[in-house]
Image: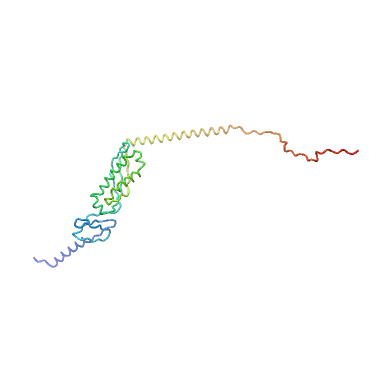
Amino acid sequence: MEISFGTVTLVIFIVALVFVFKTINVVPQQHAWVVERLGKYHATLGPGLNIVVPFIDRIAYKHVLKEIPLDVPSQVCITKDNTQLQVDGILYFQVTDAMRASYGSSNYIAAITQLAQTTLRSVIGRMELDKTFEERDHINSTVVNAIDESAANWGVKVLRYEIKDLTPPQEILHAMQAQITAERGKRALIAASEGRKQEQINIATASVKLQLPAPKATNRPPSTAHKAKPPPSSRLPKRRPAR
C-alpha cells in the first residue's frame, strides 16, 4: 500500500503542530507553574511566554499568587471557665513560593485549615468567656502568628485571620441579657438617686440664702478728729486800750 505525499505532509504538519503546542506555554499574570523534567523539579515559570522541551518537561503544578480567602469551618471551643463557644472565621493567605507549595505539603489548604482550628481552640481555651468578646484582635493576631510560622515551609504567607461569629449557648445568651438589663436598671436607679440628692442640695441652698437678714445701717455721730482747727491768730489774747 503506497502512502501518498499529501498524507505524509499532513502527518508531519500535525506532529509539528503538537510540538509547538507542547513547547510554547503562556503563563497568566499572578500565576506560577512548576515544571518537572523527567520526574524532577526543574523550574518555575513566571507570567508571559515560556518554552519547555516537549515530552521531557511537563507542567506538574499550577499556583495562583493572588490573595485567597479561605473559610475556616465552624467548631466548638471551650473557654477557661468551661463554657462552650461556637466559633467560625475566615483566613486570608497567599502563595509566595511555588516550589515549596508544590513539594512542602501534599495539601497546604487543608493543612492551613486544620492548623487554624487547633490554634483557635488553644487560644480560646486560655481565656474566659467575657474576654473572648473583648479581645478579638488579640485572638486574630495570635492565630496568624502561629499559622504563619508553620506555613513558611509550605511556601504560603498567612496575611490575616478574622473571627466571623462567636456564639455561646442559648442559656448563656439569656443570662447575659438578664445581666445587661439588671446593670442598666442599676445605673438608672443610681442616676435617679443622684438627681434627688442634688435637688435637695439646691433647695437647701436656696432656703439659706432667702433667710439671711439684710445688713443694718449704723447711725454713728460724725467724728471730730478731722475738724479744722482755727488759725493761730484767733487764739491770741486781745490787747487792752491805753488809759
Q: Which quarter of the rendered picture does the N terminus lie within? A: bottom left
Q: Residue furthest left?
A: 1
The total of numbered circles placed on residues is 0
Quarter of image, res 182: top left
Q: Quadrant of residue 5?
A: bottom left
Quadrant containing the C terminus is top right
229 lies left or right of 117? right
In this rendering, position of residue 123 left or right of residue 36: right
Give the color scheme: rainbow, by chain, secondary structure or one colour: rainbow
On the image, the x and y values in percent for residue 175 come to 35, 35
Q: Position of residue 54 (x, y in %)?
A: 19, 60
Residue extending furthest right?
243
- Name the foreground residue: 150 vs 115: 150
Residue 26: x, y in percent? 25, 60
Image quadrant assignment for residue 130: top left
> Is 152 situated left or right of 232 in this image?
left
- Residue 38 vs 197, above or below: the answer is below
Q: In the drawing, does residue 34 fall left or right of residue 222?
A: left
Q: Residue furthest bottom?
A: 5
* In front of the other: 18 or 136: 136
Place of residue 167 in the rendered image (x, y in percent of width and height, measured from the top left):
32, 40
